Image (cartoon, rainbow, N blue to C red):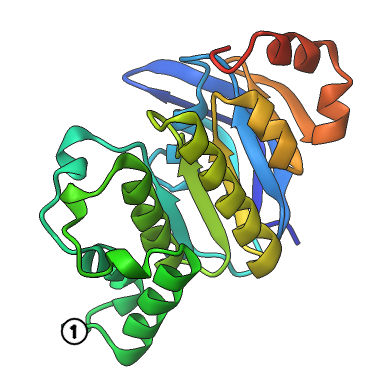
Amino acid sequence: MALITCQGASFGYEGNTAVTGLNFEVQSGDYLCVVGENGSGKSTLIKGLLRLKTPTEGSVLMGDGLKATEIGYLPQQTAAQKDFPASVYEVVLSGRMGARGLLPFYSRRDKAAANKNISMLGIESLRNRCYRELSGGQQQRVLLARALCATKRLLLLDEPVAGLDPMVTQELYKIIDRINRETGITIIMVSHDVNSAVKYASHILHLKNTQAFFGKTQAYLETELGKEFLGGGENA
């Protein structure tokens, strides 16, 4: 059973349609990369998958028992978030807030999950550092560990490498790929970097304010759309 199924879904805001005609399925263990030019509806789709937006047409269904509260989410960072005055451990642990429910304190299980994901992201040495004192790449690792604390099934990543230098970018892509392969967590990632997307993703969803392509990465590479978009470089 698919984790996510979009059936004729459209999303918009303030009476304007941002993206329409979405028909695709994401299976457990998939690594889907959502590509397209600026304003093509990528981030709007992510908000729809998070149930932050209701479809104006069609539906988005969650299957196999998946709940919206069980999705790990790494949004695009704002300046205020980069200056957050908390320790790395506190930021990562806060990813367990959704699972904590009405309990007033973090449980032993919550703390174990935080420690596990800090280890998985290789940031043990940063554990007691203040988050706002970290580099951009270090902060993204912390936020990825935080997102992992919220899920064992699905990660939504909205431009996770935006603003990072090329070396740090490639390191983060490799980490995300390893998470997908070693844990089986499904990845849905928005990215402008289509060259890296086709290197790691199992499936591609290309948006042009509608669904221009959905399918396996190899099939995308053989389309005129894929060839044209790849030829446009990272900023296409």
The quadrant in which residue 25 appears is: top right
Give the side of residue 89 with respect to residue 21, left or right.
left
- Name the residue located 37 percent from the left edge and 87 percent from the top edge: 109
Outermost residue on the left side: it is 85
The quadrant in which residue 115 appears is: bottom left
Which residue, given by chain and number where applicable, does mark 1 sit on? 105
Residue 149: horizontal and vertical position, in percent? 41, 68
Residue 226: horizontal and vertical position, in percent? 77, 17
Of 54 and 196, the residue lying toward us: 196
Q: Residue 44, can we see it? A: yes
Residue 40: horizontal and vertical position, in percent? 52, 17
**Is residue 39 placed above or below 87 in the rendered structure?**
above
Residue 100: horizontal and vertical position, in percent? 30, 78
Give the side of residue 223 with respect to residue 213, left or right.
right
- Name the residue located 57 percent from the left edge and 52 percent from the top edge: 176
Secondary structure type for disc 1 = loop
Of 189 and 168, the residue lying toward us: 168
Of 102 and 124, the residue lying toward us: 124
The quadrant in which residue 114 appears is: bottom left
Mark 1 belongs to which amino acid? Phe
Within-10-Å neighbours for mark 1: few <14, some 14–19, many 20+? few
Number of dots carrying numbers: 1
**Is residue 111 placed above or below 27 in the rendered structure?**
below
Q: Residue 94, can we see it? A: no
- Name the residue located 76 percent from the left edge and 44 percent from the top edge: 202
Which image quadrant: the C terminus? top right
Which image quadrant: the N terminus? bottom right
